[in-house]
Amino acid sequence: MEQEYPDIKIIEFRSTTEEMALRLEPHALIVGSSLAEREESSSNDDTEEYLSGQIDEVNEANQFLYDCYPETDDHEEFSKHHTISLFKKKPWNPAMSVCSHAIRLCHEVNLQKATYLYQKDKPKSGSLFNDQWMLIYPPILELIRNFLVNSKQIKSPIAYRCEQYDAVLAAFNKVLRPYQDCIYDLIAYPYDQLNEIDANGVPTGQKISVAMLINFFIKTLFEYLRSPKYVQRVNDRRKVARRREKKVLQYINKLRKHYSRLIGVRVDLYLPDDKKNFTPKEIVSNFHTLMQKLRRRESVHLAGYVTKLEYGVDQALHIHCFFFFNGSHHREDISLGRMIGEMWDQQIDGNHSYFNCNTSKNRKKYKYDALGVISRDDQAKYDNIAKVIHYFAKFEQYVLHSNLERVKTLNTGILPHHRKEIGRPNLTQHY
């Protein structure tokens, strides 16, 4: 009797606090477990990495994050990618930075159920001291300052869709916009008085303290975050991301049942400098041509693949690819990754415009090994694949580039036994 293996499932861990707040602000937790360090790579593998001007921007930041923060939820993970990029002196787009701070700010306001930032501490009767403002949530104050300073660097509307940014911006426009020239410098001085300006931008002739102004901003943001419209948008985005993740994992489970052994190969495909302006349709069209050429090679036995189309700050549009080859016909995963990368270079006239994750030097960076030989009974390897797919899917729960709003970014190939039944596959329907 054939042995049954458990299906790999969507990663989902929640704390008690998150269970209580799930209806309003649902976030999945990723819990990492340490694995043994892999062997150091030989110097012979340096050549390919040196030639490539790219980095694996998904997994490098992800693995570094897990090393520093082994247990973290999605909103914190997104923000810590920003912190890590600063630590590694990698520039972030100001628009992405301001989204990161907006995401953290919204989460903190929701978590603390904060409707104010400063609270008046009334002295005892007969005291010589006046009422004093007390700062209740220092992290929220710092997040507001970070949001404001990053917003100053943005000269045009951001090219990303982010519900949290929209909520913070709406509250900012309603409360702080008339004071934008001075509020950043005064936000930590609650006693300072400002000339009050009404909703129409007309001075009222009254004074308002910085503390009261910031309290009004926090209360307005809290109300936006509890509004049915905002909650629905956040939940809809999360459901779409998780539905796509579930379909990809079902696809991988079917590959697992169909093949006793697979070879996992990860290659990131980029665009050369003269083609950075490619549209999603153009880069996908070139990828489809690459796949047609790959399938025509009699020596190549491709079982399936998963792709993630993304828009990076430095690399513009690019595709993260996870290929699965028939382990009965292939052994060498490094050469397969190099072959795909070279075919991509020929297709787009690039100069090493790919990143081969399977080289020994690159592979040792990854804490969760999902590459190379994947035996059907290797549950640990399939669990690691699920972590990679989870990362592919979840980032769009928060930030999505406007060019990709109507594009299906997470895709799979067609199962081999289905492909034989339907004839020549129409890959376009998957995008």
Image (cartoon, rainbow, N blue to C red):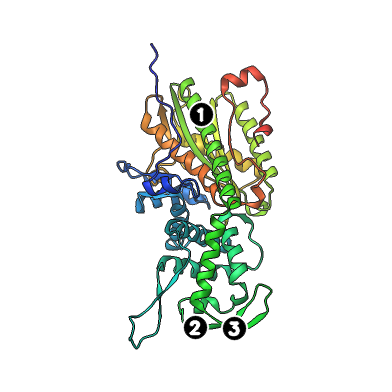
Report the residue at 45% width, 77% height from top. 188
Percent position of residue 31, x then y: 37, 44
Q: CA distance from mark 1 to mark 3?
A: 63 Å
Circle nearer the N terminus (1, 2): 2
Circle 1 or circle 3, nearest the eye: 3
Above or below 256: residue 147: below
Report crowding for label 2: few under 14, some 14 to 19, many 20 or more residues within 10 A (C-alpha).
Answer: few
- The outermost residue toward the bottom is 128
Which quadrant would the N terminus be assigned to in this image? Answer: top left
Which quadrant would the C terminus be assigned to in this image? Answer: top right
Q: CA distance from mark 3 to mark 2?
A: 13 Å
Q: Nearer the viewer, residue 210 or 383?
A: 210
- The outermost residue toward the top is 1
- Which element carries disc 1, helix, strand or loop? helix
Report the residue at 29% width, 41% height from top. 36
Report the residue at 53% width, 69% height from top. 216
- Residue 250 tag number: 1
Q: Nearer the viewer, residue 369 or 154?
A: 154
Circle nearer the N terminus (1, 3): 3
Q: Nearer the viewer, residue 374 or 123?
A: 123
- Disc 3 marks which residue? 206
- The outermost residue toward the left is 36
Q: CA distance from mark 1 to mark 2?
A: 59 Å
Q: Nearer the viewer, residue 371 or 183?
A: 183
Above or below 18: residue 374: above
Percent position of residue 181, x then y: 59, 78
- Disc 2 marks which residue? 192
Q: Is residue 404 visible?
A: yes
Please state which amino acid type lies under the numbered disc 2. Asp
Please state which amino acid type lies under the numbered disc 3. Gln
